[in-house]
Image (tube, rainbow, N blue to C red):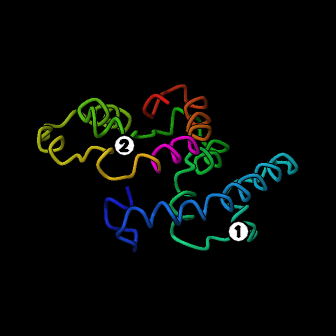
Amino acid sequence: MEFRKGHVNESHPDHFEEILNQTMPEIQRVLKDFEIMRKETSPSINIWEYTWLGRAVIANEFERFIGGGLYYYHIEPFLKHYSKSRIHIVSTYQLETNPEIEVGKLFKFVGLESQSLDWEALRRSVKPPEEDMNPRVREMLTKFFQRHNKMLEDEFGETFYLEY
């Protein structure tokens, strides 16, 4: 998504794959350390506290993008203060493929009546995911995020992502 939007400095998709291959081992090491620390602390440390401790060094934009996609870890601290019924998660996949349904859920959550929107214009602006990334990179990222996405889905009892 960040590459497609032009937020990644490098414009060549192969360069993205190259840097991702170099970055993933460090990201996996940091996540392993975080998981160990979560088990050893009481109450368990959250991702924000872990980052503030300086344990996770964000060395480049790719690590930031990967870390930003660990949705469960970012939502987890809020679950200590708010019930799940007070948290609404919007699935970007559903927003792109079924905007009426996903926006309808959002309106209902915030207590608004449905609005008349130009759904066809929204559909036309969606760029299919297959067009924006090398299939090898997409598969690598899908495998990496699968466990983390499942944690979020299990917590909320919903499916937010494509079938794995």
Q: Which sits in the foreground, 54 or 66? A: 66
Q: Amino acid at mark 2?
A: Thr
Position of 54 with respect to 96 (left or right) is right
138 magenta-colored: yes
Badge 1 is on which residue? 52
- Tell me the mark number nearer the camera, choosing from 1 and 2: 2
Q: Amino acid at mark 1?
A: Trp
Q: Residue 70: image x %, image y %?
A: 57, 49
Residue 92 numbered tag:
2
Residue span colored magenta: 137-145
Residue at 82%, 50% (x, y): give it. 36
Q: Which sits in the foreground, 116 or 96? A: 96
Q: Residue 18: image x %, image y %?
A: 51, 64
Separation of disc 1 and disc 2 at Cα? Answer: 28 Å
Q: Quadrant of residue 162?
A: top left
Quick check: 40 above or below 88? below
